[in-house]
Image (spheres, rainbow, N blue to C red):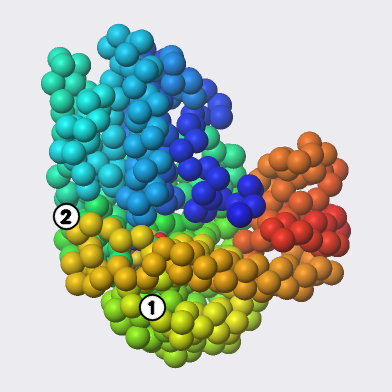
Amino acid sequence: MLDLETKVHDESRQGEAYAPAVAGTQTYTKKFYIESYGCAMNFNDSEIVASILGQEGYGPTRNAEEASLILLNTCSIREKAEQTVRKRLTEFKKLKRETPGMLVGVLGCMAERIKGKLLEEEKLVDLVVGPDAYRSLPALIAEAETGQKSVNVLLSREETYGDISPVRLDNNGVTSFVSIMRGCNNMCTFCVVPFTRGRERSRDAYSIVREARELFDNGYREVTLLGQNVDSYYWTSADGSETITFAMLLEKVAQIDPLLRVRFSTSHPKDITDEVLFIMQRYENICNYIHLPVQSGSSRILQLMNRTYTREWYMKKVDRIRELIPDCGLSTDIICGFCTETEEDHQDTLSLMKYAQYDLAYMYFYSERPGTLAERRYDDDIPEEVKKRRLAEVVELHRKYSQAGMEREVGKTFRVLVEGTSKRSTEQLFGRSDQNKVIVFPKENFKKGDYVMVKVESCTSGTLIGKAVQ
Ligand code: SAH
Ligand code: SF4
Ligand code: F3S
């Protein structure tokens, strides 16, 4: 189970309704309610949707009952994610029946994947809008208001919403996401993302820097640059005179202010370059933390997954990271029970975990997704109980290493960016170390947004506990 204060990929936040912590000055004539599922990029998309709807006089609310528009921004990554949304939709049926004129819309990856089906099966859905079609939301809403079902699931090769300032929903005012690209070209065989999000495209570098600077000027102290594969970021200006790689972008964002921390996610192991590692070395405010999903420790399985690296190649990448950035935090994603996975392959995953000593891991059992290359090419032949048993072993081993990693931090002092008051006690603040570990410490006179040197005195499995030092 993830710590509740963990932010990126936090499953505990899945589906939470959210609205700005502080009401804006704008007056709204109508209200919308939005729930988001899936990855950080999807949550960030909901903020773009909020911005587009704001222009139309729609303000966000946390209370579905007072909304005239209900939106679910959905995820298709695993079957379970889709089931959760279907269940939520049936729960909204009653509310819709009781509220004349209420519209219900499905946005995001499920909209893209099962468009027609949603309209047919889920009679209550009025709007189906794919991830590249949010600009058409006002027109689609107007159409739906006349009683027609409205759909736009066209994927685009250009859309990046680069010019839209996201309305920050349910934020802490200190840390924020900034999307730098959309889509994915990688075609990992298990993955539905290339089909739901379309081709990879990079957002205008200057609009990214502008957004990050605005966040800093508004008191934010950390930005996380988001993309399915950030290291393949590559933007060329319209006249072709300038080309910006991820390393260059990272540097530009780091140069905004030394007090602005910079994180990024996700790095595909095949694409993270030495240049990126050198830039991380050079700038104190780029956090020493890399999310480097391995998926499997078996070269044979990695090949079936089309990850394009081997076990050995991945290990060398880990070595290189540790060589250049010795205190770098490292996290991963692991899939258990992919097609044809043997006990030996599974053991390879366990031994690789031992090698990498991840601080954080997101672990799943394989869930076959219709339309993916794996679904078309391979048999989903590992029985569910075997998948689950292997997953339990992976989770257990990870717990052991991450606990040991936490214990190693006791006695050390970290620079912590304060994100808020601890959920467990109002007398305690919580924040994160450069390496992304959650640290809780007595409040004293510190506040949100401060950088505080904290000496760690003890730990739980997910949290370091310490005290501020001079
Ligand atoms: N772009 C990121 C991953 C995005 S999806 C990357 O390449 O690393 C997040 C994670 O979900 C993946 O890393 C993978 O571990 C998991 N995942 C994706 N498809 C899955 C499936 N069909 N079954 C189980 N887990 C899956
Ligand atoms: Fe999916 Fe692979 Fe793209 Fe990640 S890199 S989004 S796992 S296809
Ligand atoms: Fe899910 Fe779509 Fe993200 S499938 S993980 S919401 S890109």
Residue drawn where x is 46% and y is 86% of the image: 344
Residue 201 location, x and y as percent? 24, 59
Kind of residue indicated by mark 2: Arg
Q: Is mark 2 within 8 Å of ligand 2?
A: no
Is the residue marked by circle 2 packed among few (<14), some (14-19), or many (20+) residues within 10 Å? Answer: few
Q: Is residue 55 visible?
A: no
Label 1 sits on residue: 341
Which of the 4 image quadrants contains residue 172? top right
Locate ligand 2 by image quadrant. Answer: bottom left
Given residues 152 and 230, the one toward you in this image is 152
Label 2 sits on residue: 157
Rendered position, 31 above or below 406: above
Which of the 4 image quadrants contains residue 107? top left
Residue 53 location, x and y as percent? 32, 27
Residue 12 location, x and y as percent? 55, 45
Compare marks 2 and 1 and give the one earlier in the sequence. 2
Give the quadrant of the N terminus. Answer: bottom right
Residue 36 location, x and y as percent? 41, 39
Given residues 465 and 48, the one toward you in this image is 465
Residue drawn where x is 53% and y is 59% of the image: 262
Q: Secondary structure at mark 1?
A: loop
Left or right of 2 on screen, residue 30: left
Give the quadrant of the C terminus. Answer: bottom right
Left or right of 320 on screen, residue 273: left
Residue drawn where x is 34% and y is 22% of the image: 93
Question: In the image, which is nearer the foreground, mark 2 or mark 1?
Answer: 1
In whole angstroms, how far apart are the C-alphas of marks 2 and 1?
Answer: 35 Å
Q: Is residue 89 visible?
A: yes
Rendered position, 421 above or below 398: above
Which of the 4 image quadrants contains residue 73? top left
- Residue 241's label in the rendered image is none
Kind of residue indicated by mark 1: Glu
